[in-house]
Image: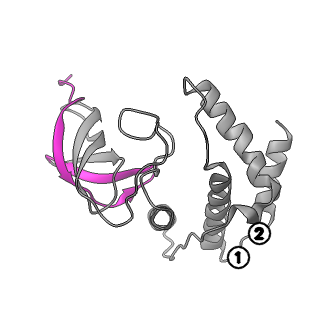
Amino acid sequence: MSDSLVGAECELDVGPVAHGGHCVARWDGRVVFVRHTLPGERVRVRITEGDGDSSFLRGDAVEVRAGVEGRVEAPCPYAGPGRCGGCDFQHVSPWRQRELLADVVAEQLRRLGGVEREVVVEAVQPDALGDLASEVDTPIFGAYTETIMPTVAPQPYGPAFAAAATAIMAGVQQAVTGDEPIAEIAASIQQQLDRQ
């Protein structure tokens, strides 16, 4: 077994977004999945997982040396390197988040399904979901903050989360089937909430 690289730091140029809120960079011939960054940035990365024998590494961007358009200050005090593992795109503006999510879906369709199709994740206003948005906020964020975080933090993005999740699911359906998004998605979410 090789020595751990956890804690090692390097400066990397960040490549495309990957599934799971990471972006891809390379260090000494290995892929490094980096959180808290955006494609096109130059960042100082602290390795969080991997050793000298690992085929890939994971790391956190701990300093942005050259940022790109779409980067914003994370509104949540728990977001960032060494902190909470949720909300991977807190540092990304909403319009850029939609572009990144569309890139991930399009890449997965291409790589796994052999489907070449442009994917657009449209903005959905929380009001479009009516009462569903506030109901999604309570069980998801309530359980998360009560069990994971030592204190319950304000969760101003509950309705936005519900709207974004619905928009993403509808966008994936449309990309795969060519159909228009359907209302059953919102009904399915509501049924799951009713069971809780």
> Which residue type carries mark 2?
Ile
Which sits in the foreground, 45 or 126?
126
Quarter occupied by the C terminus: top right
Element carrying mark 2: loop
In the image, residue 38 lies at what x, y percent?
Answer: 34, 57
Which sits in the foreground, 185 or 114?
185
The quarter holding residue 170 reads bottom right
Element carrying mark 1: loop
> Which residue type carries mark 1?
Asp
Q: Residue at x 17, y 24 (%)?
A: 3
Residue 57 vs residue 88: left or right? Answer: left
The magenta segment: 1-28
Instruction: Rate crowding at label 1 as few (under 14), some (14 to 19) or many (20 or more) other CA atoms within 10 Å.
Output: few
- Seen as rendered, the residue at the extreme left is 28
Residue of label 1? 179
Q: Is residue 45 visible?
A: yes
Tell me the mark number nearer the camera, choosing from 2 and 1: 2
Residues marked 2 and 1 touching at CB (< 8 Å): yes
Residue 99 vs residue 151: left or right? Answer: left
In the image, residue 109 lies at what x, y percent?
Answer: 51, 66
Q: Residue at x 80, y 43 (%)?
A: 193
Q: Residue at x 54, y 73 (%)?
A: 120
Residue of label 2? 182
In reply to whether residue 17 is colored magenta, the answer given is yes
Which sits in the foreground, 113 or 172?
172
